[in-house]
Image: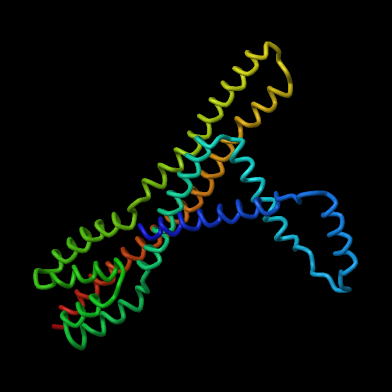
Amino acid sequence: MKKLFALIAVFGMLFMGASIFAQAETSQTPANEDTTQVAEEVAVAETPAYTEPAATEEESGLAVLHNTLKTKFIEGGAGFMGAVLLTLIFGLALAFERVIYLNLASTNTDKLLSAVENALNDGGVEAAKEVCRNTRGPVASIFYQGLDRVEEGIDVVEKSVVSYGSVQMGLLEKNLSWISLFIAIAPMLGFMGTVIGMITAFDTIQQQGDISPAIVAGGIKIALITTVTGLMVAIILQIFYNYLVSQIDSIVNKMEDASISLIDMLVKHNLKK
């Protein structure tokens, strides 16, 4: 988790540094106009027949998007826009961590059931426990807890599977509450920035002593930027949240189905004995 936060921070710093450096390069002007004119004439005279292709539409579009986002960020105010941006960074960090965890928790239950059944028939319970021990994921952990209590009876095995299934479900749903919190906070911060921006605009009107359409429109535009940003952040995080919930539901359904299959398998194994 800490490495993920560090990577996101380093990437953001490099991105901002590159943009600032590019702006600094483009903002430099020549010392005098005569030198510039001479240089241009020489460049035109020595220009070869072949010229490098201009920037592609995709590159120019990305540059325009980057400049627009940076301009709107500055217009909206560093305070509230920075807070909204932090909610996006922390929310995405938690979402990426959950995506990685859920992908690692996914297990081919059919293959695991087949391996456990073969191990039970060939080497008994200990062999089946070894298969579960060497398999990652919550389903294998639940199987191991059930197999570890086979000698105590099927009823105990069933209770153990249900209890440990609840524990695994809690692990799957970890940090989802924080993501939902960031989804709720981002629009609130945006609305707060809008209200404060409107108050500032009305203060400016009061100081001017006259209602100018330019002042009113400019103040309202700047105030609404934070609301739009907060809503965009909430939408992005909501998409990730719904994806994570659907993945968790899929894993839980597989866990329940596989647990029932394990109980049936153990009953058949004991009847054979």
**Residue nearer the viewer, 7 or 156:** 7
- Residue 234 lies, in percent from the top left, at 51, 43
Q: Is residue 98 above or below residue 209?
A: below
Q: How many marks?
A: 0
Query: Which quadrant does the C terminus fall into?
Result: bottom left
**Towards the viewer: 98 or 119:** 98
- Residue nearest the viewer, comparing 127 with 214: 214
Q: Is residue 143 above or below residue 34?
A: below
Q: From what the image shows, is residue 213 above or below residue 125? A: above
Residue 212 spot, x, y in % from top left: 73, 18
Apparent side of residue 172 relative to residue 161 in the rendered image (left or right) = right
Which is nearer the eye, 234 or 172? 234
Horizontal arrangement in the rendering, residue 38 relative to residue 213 (left or right): right
Residue shown at 86% from the left, 58% from the top: 38
Residue at the location (15% across, 80% down)?
Answer: 126
Residue 189 in the image, given as x and y percentages of width and height? 49, 34
Residue 58: x %, y % from top left:
71, 60
